[in-house]
Image: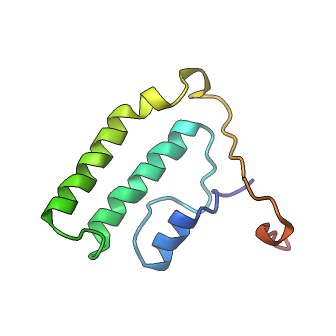
């Protein structure tokens, strides 16, 4: 693959003009790089989407959750696979879900 994964969350942000800071030519070589960008997606959403935070209590909870996930990430990922080839497994490989451009 010559470009990044097309993930709904990233595409949704771009459609709402929220920066993802992920270039379209990025190819993930490790799982950690993907996880870190996925967490950065939520950071950008909190900063740039005005209606993402409901109230002060909600904002504290969301920021605390992000902080906890960042701290606990090493416990939920396998160190053996941390820097090995990244494989993204699609769960619904139906013909209508696969898009291929003419190039």
Image quadrant in which you'd find residue 86: top right
Q: Position of residue 75 (x, y in %)?
A: 44, 27
Along the line of sight, the residue nearer the viewer: 96 or 46: 96
Left or right of 40, for residue 63: left
Q: Position of residue 97 (x, y in %)?
A: 77, 68
Left or right of 4, for residue 47: left
Identify whether 39 is placed above or below 49: above
| Residue at x 23% of width, y 53% of height | 61
In this view, which residue lies farthest toward the top? Answer: 80
Position of the C terminus, as image quadrant, is bottom right
Visual colour scheme: rainbow
Image quadrant in which you'd find residue 84: top right
Left or right of 92, for residue 72: left
Q: Position of residue 85 (x, y in %)?
A: 68, 34
In this view, which residue lies farthest toward the left? Answer: 56
Q: Position of residue 99 (x, y in %)?
A: 78, 70
Identify whether 81 is placed above or below 12: above
| Residue at x 68% of width, y 46% of height | 88
How many dots with numbers? 0
Image quadrant in which you'd find residue 95: bottom right
Left or right of 56, for residue 8: right
Along the line of sight, the residue nearer the viewer: 9 or 48: 9
Along the line of sight, the residue nearer the viewer: 23 or 72: 72
| Residue at x 32% of width, y 73% of height | 49
| Residue at x 18% of width, y 55% of height | 60
């Amino acid at each position: 693959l010559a470009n990044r994964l097309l993930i709904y969350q990233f595409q949704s942000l771009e459609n709402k003009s929220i920066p993802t800071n992920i270039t379209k030519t990025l190819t993930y070589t490790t799982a950690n790089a993907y996880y870190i960008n996925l967490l950065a997606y939520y950071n950008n959403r909190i900063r740039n989407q005005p209606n993402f935070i409901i109230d002060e209590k909600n904002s504290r909870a969301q920021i605390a959750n992000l902080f906890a996930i960042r701290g606990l990430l090493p416990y939920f990922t396998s160190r053996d696979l941390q820097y090995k080839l990244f494989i993204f497994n699609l769960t619904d490989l139906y013909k209508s879900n696969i898009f291929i451009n003419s190039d």
